[in-house]
Image (spheres, rainbow, N blue to C red):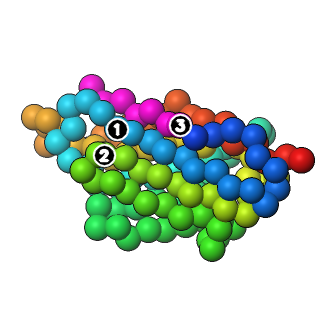
């Protein structure tokens, strides 16, 4: 009923930048929070950043001042601008959204399939 599709991952050198995007589509009535998790090999999935409908955002401490999350409510999209990338940022990045689908009264969390970010020289 709802699909999230990420784009923008890839290979970048340390200190470089990438911009991830995620588009939500389907039977969407409303979206509250959108955000990004990441999971590195052998590590637990961790919340990188999230943004509410009013634009208020929260960040993982290790990415503050380097990453910026933004949202386009009209297009049901969320972006993650990642600057000054470090090798430890290497992970699969997953987009998520808390969605109220059309005709429903409860909220569901939907996930994208993930996009690989590799920071290496």
Q: Position of residue 11 (x, y in %)?
A: 75, 40
Q: Is residue 112 above or below residue 21?
A: above
User: Element under label 3?
Assistant: strand
- Residue sticking out furthest to the top: 1
Residue bearing the label numbered 1: 24
How crowded pointer 1 is (Cα within 10 Å; few <14, some 14-19, many 20+) is rated as: many
Q: Quadrant of residue 62?
A: bottom right
Q: What residue is drawn where x is 33% and y is 54%?
A: 72
Q: What residue is drawn where x is 67% and y is 62%?
A: 83
Q: Looking at the rendering, in which quadrant would you find the N terminus?
A: top left
User: Element under label 2?
Assistant: loop
**Range of magenta residues:** 1-7
Badge 2 vs badge 1, beta-carbon distance below 8 Å = yes
Return the disc, 3 or 1, that comes first in the chain's sequence: 3
Residue bearing the label numbered 3: 7
How many numbered discs, if any? 3
Q: Is residue 10 magenta?
A: no
Q: Is residue 93 left or right of residue 5?
A: right
Return the disc, 2 or 1, that comes first in the chain's sequence: 1
Q: Which mark is residue 76?
A: 2
> Observer-nearest residue: 108 or 9?
9
Q: Position of residue 6 (x, y in %)?
A: 50, 37
Rounded to the nearest whole Å, what is the CA distance between mark 2 and mark 1?
Answer: 5 Å
Q: Is residue 19 left or right of residue 17?
A: left
Q: Quadrant of residue 101?
A: top left
């Amino acid at each position: 009923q709802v699909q999230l599709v990420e784009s923008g991952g890839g290979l970048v050198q340390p200190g470089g930048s990438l911009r991830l995007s995620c588009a939500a589509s389907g039977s969407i009535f409303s979206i509250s929070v959108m955000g990004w998790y990441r999971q590195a090999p052998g590590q637990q999935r961790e919340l990188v950043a999230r943004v509410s409908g009013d634009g208020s955002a929260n960040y993982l401490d290790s990415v503050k001042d380097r990453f910026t999350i933004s949202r386009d409510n009209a297009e049901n999209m969320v972006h993650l601008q990642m600057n000054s990338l470090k090798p430890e940022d290497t992970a699969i990045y997953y987009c998520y959204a808390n969605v109220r689908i059309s005709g429903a009264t409860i909220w569901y969390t939907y996930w994208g399939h993930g996009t690989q970010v590799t920071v290496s020289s």
